[in-house]
Image (cartoon, coloured by chain):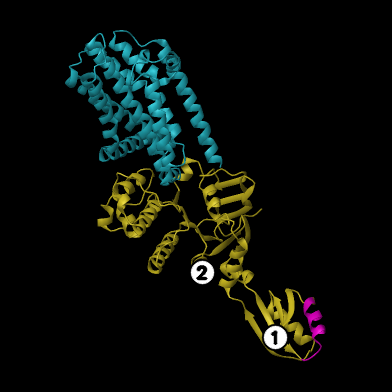
Chain colours: A yellow, B cyan
Amino acid sequence: MIQQLSGEPIVELKQVTKTFGSKKAVNRVSFTIERGSITAILGPNGAGKSTAISMMLGLKDTSEGEVLLFGQSPKDLKVREKIGAMLQEVSVMDGLRTREIINLIRSYYPNPMTLEEIAALSGLTPEELGKWAVKMSGGQKRKLSFALAIAGNPELLFFDEPTVGLDTSARRLFWQTVRGLKAQGKTILFTTHYLQEADDIAERIVLFHQGQVAADGTPEAIKSKLTRRTVSFIADADGQQVIRLLHEVPGVTDVYEQDGRLIAVTSDTDTALAALFRAGLTVRDIRIDQGSLDEAFDQLTMSQGEAG
Amino acid sequence: MKNLKLITIQCRMELLRMIRNPYYIFWSLAMPILFYFIFTRIVDTGAAEAGQWQAHYLMSMTSFSVMGTAIMSLGIRLVQERVQGWSIYMRVTPLPGSVYFFGKMFVQAIMHLLCIVVIFTAGYLINGVSLSFWQWLFSGLWILIASIPFLALGTLIGAMRRVDTASGVSNGIYLALAVTGGMWFPIEAMPGFMQAIGKWMPSYHFGGGAWAITRGEAPGWDHILILTGYLLVFMILSTYIRKKQQAD
């Protein structure tokens, strides 16, 4: 097969399953992440995002299937020299100052960033660098966690729910920095349960739902898949005839009557309209509506229930 | 070459952390020294030879101190670092797990050495315990080397999920081992069934080697064999649990 133009695969998941007891936290997930891309793994809490990240980082073994980073096992030390990660649990080491921890981690990598670069990108001030790591506030620990992720100047970065608990301005600053890292050619993979965030930042969204990939594509494609578009109108002609007609149209998934209006749910409003006009039916007051994206996403989240 | 650099940095950082957190060392030293003072100076144990008893009990308390450091501070610190997410983070970095572990063991060895030197000195200052140079050296070396099975036990405790559990369990095991192994009171002074149990305890054989040296004898093979046996059991268990935890 001819190699796709879009770039070499950096992360490959092949039919990956992770079972905890009888529950499948991740169920036959496959996808490939290409060099230089920025991808969001989007899904409600408990959808299996963090478990997937843990397997990609080699922290958890897969129950079935295979994860490859740079074509090798994520546990390979050569692979780990090329990756950086910001995990959900912010980790600090007691008995050391922030600067000492950063320098310790830097020493593990062959070509680390300089302390100055790290401080500039993470926003750690000289005063914070001199602080005991355990005495830092939650926000400061986040900055340290980010600093440690980039310390080794990695080619591939993982951020697991990086903005949870950050205020709006901190969030904006964080994504601005991440965009800068992407501009340097780094490959970025992050998880989030905010649709807006995935939409704003990522070039591609992998939507997780109950441990499976529910959708995978550009934010535009994901949004059109998630949102419910409808064509509605008042039909002067025989209602039943219109309903039958609309059911035949490709893309229409449902047709019903509400408050004197006929409503057709469809993925392709253009085709539905064309069919209406072609049939020459007397309809008026045509409206095209798009359900709110957040509403649609919330609905998905709700159906997830208390899966944890 | 690169690993050597990593090992040096890792050991230096772990040492720095130990020095900055003297709380752990303080408790490893304070209780044994206090016990030593009480049972050789205040309470009359009625030992026939005071000099021999003072040397014997000095070895008991040094072993007691080192055993505590090995089980408790290593075990609890390992759990702490995992609960805080630190040791998980380390597995994402290119630092080989073996180097991380070596750094921990290095600091433990330094702490054990410190316990030995300080408590030996205390024995000399409190009772003027007099042993030959070789007896001091070999008993010190024995305690340092024979502490390895207890480090393996500490690592096993380090696999626990919560600091509270690890702390409680390690305290319990520590005190039980100390009492049954004759570190607090010689097992010869205990009822027969306690003696029978004690003779299979790693703590009895740990102290036993050092007690033998103070009597001018070499540590017996029974001490070496039983301690090696415990070491193997603890290592196998700990490897098994670690494998299982990662598979989860």
The amino acid sitting under disc 1 is: Asp
Residue B69, percent from left and from top: 34, 30
Q: Main secondary structure of the magenta part?
A: helix
Q: Earlier in the sequence, mark 2 or mark 1?
A: 2
Residue B99, percent from left and from top: 39, 35
The crowd level at tag 1 (other Cα within 10 Å; few <14, some 14-19, many 20+) is few
Is the same chain shared between marks 2 and 1? yes
Q: Which mark is residue B172?
A: none
- Comparing B189 with B131, the one in front is B189
Please tell me which residue is depicted at 23% across the width and 21% down the height of the picture: B120
> Badge 1 is on which residue?
A259
Secondary structure found at label 2: helix
Q: Is residue A205 left or right of residue A281?
A: left
Quadrant where the C terminus of chain A sits is bottom right
Please tell me which residue is depicted at 43% across the width and 43% down the height of the picture: B82
> Badge 2 is on which residue?
A196
Residue B156, percent from left and from top: 45, 32
Residue B197's place in the image compared with A139, above or below, is above
| Callout in the foreground (2, 1) | 1
Q: Is residue A45 left or right of residue A83?
A: right
Asked if residue B39 shows in the view, the reply is yes
Range of magenta residues: A236-247
The chain containing the residue under callout 2 comes to A
Residue B77, percent from left and from top: 37, 38
Residue A296's place in the image compared with B88, above or below, is below
- Comparing A297 with A102, the one in front is A297
Q: Is residue B46 left or right of residue B67?
A: left
Query: How far is the residue under mark 2 from the one under mark 1?
Result: 32 Å
